[in-house]
Image (spheres, helix red, strand yellow):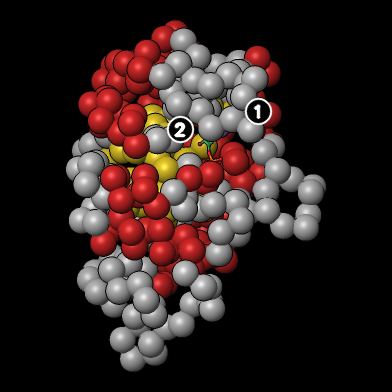
């Protein structure tokens, strides 16, 4: 689709060419991930390692994040790595570990799906399937996922415009899957100070233009552990329905994305910092929709 920018009908609120994701269609959507509602009054915190490395690692992480108020467990069993020589994920064994850890801690599980062939086995183990930034415009995958019967976490491509991101979501709804959560995870810009540039205005924008829940990934957006709490708070302040952060028992020895993973202690600290604003000034209401 030629991206001529987002054109919105001022009377109806409909985004041109994207009738199903447009805000005018229905009330704000609440997407259930297992027994956790996303997009309601409660802000959600999904957390866990970038990659599933071992049973002990994931179980320890699941219990630690649960204890500190996380609402879902994340972890990659199929990893989209820039180099073919990097760790590619444990595959089905990783899925089994995630399921066991999620059940043990009482947390729903979200994990990435990279190709059509893996959809069925991932659906057998996970509560939500993540489409990674690198696959946002894999339309064959999106079409298959629109029929999979599980909610989808749709990450924004690193070089995708908001319109392209929303068009990818439209594919899922068009194919019959209404349970879509958008995730801003940083985009490529001229600035190389950080891994990516967190586009917080886009978060406010898609909350205004669509009825879909939107969450923010401060780990991939910044690439830097020390910035995660600050950007998570900022995300919630602009209206995000939640955050997804990487947490690892020993980040310095993580097999992927250690520099942007929180220790258990830092996760606890971040939760303490975001809990207060959540209870007070940032209590979310239905009127946040414009
Ligand atoms: C991830 O969640 O570990 C990941 C690979 O994310 P992204 O697709 O946003 O790079
Ligand atoms: Mn990662």
Rendering quarter of residue 20: bottom left
Q: Quadrant of residue 261?
A: top right
Res. 125 mark: none
Q: In what quadrant does ligand 2 lie?
A: top right
Asked whether 90 or 30 is in front, the reply is 90
**Looking at the image, residue 188 lies above or below residue 210:** above
Circle 2 residue: 47
Instruction: Identify the residue at horizontal 53%, vertical 77% (top origin).
Output: 5
The residue under label 1 is 83
Residue plotted at (58% across, 44% down): 218
Name the residue: 37% across, 58% down.
169
Question: For mark 1, does the 10 Å Cα neighbourhood hold few (<14), some (14 to 19), or many (20 or more) residues?
Answer: few
Q: Are marks 1 and 2 in contact (CB under 8 Å)?
A: no
Label 2 element class = strand
Q: Is mark 2 within 8 Å of ligand 1?
A: no
**Res. 215 visible in picture:** no
Task: For residue 27, say whether it is visible.
Answer: yes
Gap between marks 1 and 2 measured at Cα: 25 Å
């Amino acid at each position: 689709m030629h991206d001529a920018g987002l054109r919105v009908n001022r009377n109806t609120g409909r985004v041109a060419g994207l009738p199903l994701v447009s805000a005018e269609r229905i009330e704000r959507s609440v997407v259930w991930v297992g027994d956790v509602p996303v997009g309601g009054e409660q802000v959600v915190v999904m957390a866990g390692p970038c990659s599933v490395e071992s049973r002990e690692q994931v179980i320890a992480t699941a219990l630690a994040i649960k204890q500190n108020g996380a609402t879902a467990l994340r972890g990659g069993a199929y990893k989209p790595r820039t180099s073919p020589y990097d760790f590619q994920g444990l595959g089905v064994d990783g899925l089994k570990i995630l399921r066991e850890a999620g059940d043990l801690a009482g947390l729903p599980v979200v994990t990435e799906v990279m190709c059509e062939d893996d959809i069925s086995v991932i659906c057998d183990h996970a509560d939500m399937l993540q489409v990674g930034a690198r696959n946002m415009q894999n339309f064959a995958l999106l079409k298959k996922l629109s029929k999979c019967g599980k909610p989808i976490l749709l990450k924004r491509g690193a070089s995708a415009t908001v319109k392209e991101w929303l068009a990818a979501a439209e594919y899922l709804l068009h194919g019959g899957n209404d349970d879509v959560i958008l995730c801003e995870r940083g985009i490529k810009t001229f600035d190389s100070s950080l891994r990516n540039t967190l586009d917080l205005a886009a978060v406010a924008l898609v909350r205004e233009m669509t009825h879909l829940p939107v969450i923010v990934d401060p780990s991939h957006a910044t690439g830097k552990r020390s910035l995660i709490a600050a950007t998570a708070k900022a995300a919630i302040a602009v209206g995000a329905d939640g955050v997804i952060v990487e947490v690892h028992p020993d980040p310095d020895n993580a097999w992927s994305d250690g520099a942007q993973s929180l220790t258990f202690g830092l996760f606890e600290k971040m939760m303490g910092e975001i809990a207060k604003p959540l209870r007070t000034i940032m209590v979310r209401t239905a009127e946040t929709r414009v």
